[in-house]
Amino acid sequence: MHAEVLDDFRSGGGMNREALARQTERYQLVHEWHANGTLVSADDFLWASAALVTSDAPKDLDLASELALMAAELGEKRGFTVQAEAADKLLVAQARPQRYGTQYIFEPVHQRWKLYPVDPLTSDVERRSMGIPSLAELLQNVEELNDALRKDKDE
């Protein structure tokens, strides 16, 4: 499953009907594995949560968050990062500021990336504890994305 996920991302994933169908199948599989108790190791929980966090459906994101925390509890620190992404995606879907800063949006009118609004009450210490860079680093990442976009246009 891991290799298929990587292939789908490399091929553009969301723009490809076959890749979207495989994603939907993966979401269903993860829900089945969770219900059947098939997920047991930190690695199982991490990869299952990483598959689900690509979804926009609240039920998938809720389960992604739960599974990511299980991975973290079992010693897989990357679970915290996946949990932060799931939490932010849920907040963005509700048109609320994200907590950690994992979600970027593209503004087609301005042809620029920007960081989706971030809750100012979340500290860089909290971000780092979840494996997320500081707010200053996140904003720098946006500038790098926009620089790369400008370079692509110039070529």
Image (cartoon, grey):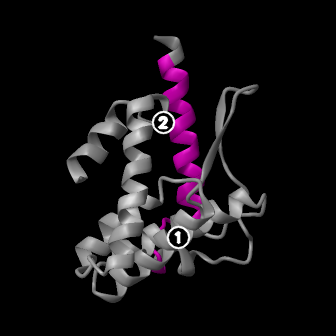
Give neighbour class at mark 1: few <14, some 14-19, many 20+ (Cα, 10 Å): many
Quadrant of the rendered image containing residue 101:
bottom right
Camera-nearest residue between 109 and 47? 47
For the residue marked with disc 1, what is the amino acid?
A: Ala
Q: Marks 1 and 2, Cα distance to the nearest angstrom? A: 22 Å
The structure residue drawn at horizontal position 37% and vertical position 75%, both measured from the top left corner, is 34
Q: Kindly tell me whether residue 131 is visible in this rendering.
A: no
| Side of 2 relative to 118 (left or right) | left
Span highlighted in magenta in the image: 129-152
Which x, y percent locates residue 151? Answer: 49, 21
Q: Could you tell me which quadrant the C terminus lies in? A: top left
Mark 2 is surrounded, within 10 Å at the Cα level, by few (under 14), some (14 to 19) or many (20 or more) other residues, namely some
Which residue is at a point 32% across and 71% down the rendered structure image?
Answer: 33
Circle nearer the viewer, 1 or 2: 2
Q: Are marks 1 and 2 in contact (CB under 8 Å)?
A: no
Task: Residue 3 in the image: state x and y as whole percent.
Answer: 21, 47
Amino acid type, callout 2: Gly
| Lower sequence index among marks 1 and 2 | 2
Give the labeled residue for mark 2. Answer: 14
Q: Residue at x 25, y 44 (%)?
A: 4
Q: Main secondary structure of the magenta part?
A: helix
Asked if residue 119 is among those painted magenta in the image, a careful observer would answer no
Task: State the mark number for residue 118.
Answer: none
Residue under numbered circle 1: 84
Query: Which residue is drawn at the image coordinates 31% and 64% (left, top)?
Result: 47
Residue that protrudes farthest toward the bottom in the picture? 73
- The number of discs equals 2
Residue 137 belongs to magenta span: yes
